[in-house]
């Protein structure tokens, strides 16, 4: 119980810092004059907004924070999948990155499925 307030304050402060980073990312996206990396800047901004929402919601609405956190991780997994399977991937061993992205998606889906299964079993008893 002693750590409850500092954890909430730390989570809110971290959420505000991440929200500021997301705002600066969107500012660069809107005002930036660049040819490459425009989509990546937008995708990073969306990820930071989801991460900030998770950090801000988790202390006060734990269930909602958990759902937003899982959606944030799934968003990250999908973006990684798209990134590693693009033909423009500049890496010496792209197969390694592709296996890592696929395994992240599989682990996240397994975690969500096990959580749903556990919740369904708990309701049955």
Image (spheres, rainbow, N blue to C red):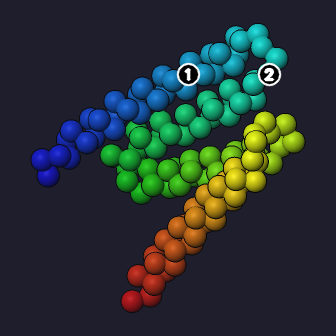
| Residue at image coords 69%, 19% | 29
From the viewer's perspective, is residue 16 above or below residue 117?
above
Q: Which mark is residue 23?
A: 1
* 1 vs 2, front mark: 2
Q: Secondary structure at mark 1?
A: helix
Q: Is residue 43 visible?
A: yes
* Res. 78 visible in picture: no
**Residue for point 60% across, 22% down:** 25
Residue matched to label 2: 36
Numbered label attached to residue 108:
none
Q: Does residue 25 lie above or below 84 as drawn?
A: above
Which residue occupies 68% across, 34% down?
43
User: For residue 106, which quarter of the picture?
Assistant: bottom right
Image x and y of residue 89, in percent = 80, 39
User: Which residue is located at x 64 percent, y 51 percent?
Assistant: 77
The location of residue 7, given as percent across then percent down, is: 25, 42
Give the side of residue 66 with respect to residue 37, left or right: left
In the structure shown, which secondary structural element does the residue marked by tag 2 occupy? loop
């Amino acid at each position: 119980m002693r750590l409850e307030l500092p954890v909430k304050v730390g989570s809110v402060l971290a959420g505000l810092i991440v929200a500021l980073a997301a705002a600066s990312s969107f500012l660069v996206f809107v005002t930036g004059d660049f040819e490459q990396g425009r989509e990546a800047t937008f995708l990073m901004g969306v990820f930071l907004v989801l991460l900030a929402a998770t950090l801000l919601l988790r202390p006060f609405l734990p269930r909602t924070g958990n759902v937003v956190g899982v959606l944030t991780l799934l968003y990250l997994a999908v973006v990684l999948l798209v990134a590693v399977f693009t033909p423009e991937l500049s890496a010496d061993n792209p197969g390694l990155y592709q296996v890592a992205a696929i395994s992240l998606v599989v682990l996240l889906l397994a975690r969500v499925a096990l959580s749903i299964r556990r919740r369904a079993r708990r309701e049955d008893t």
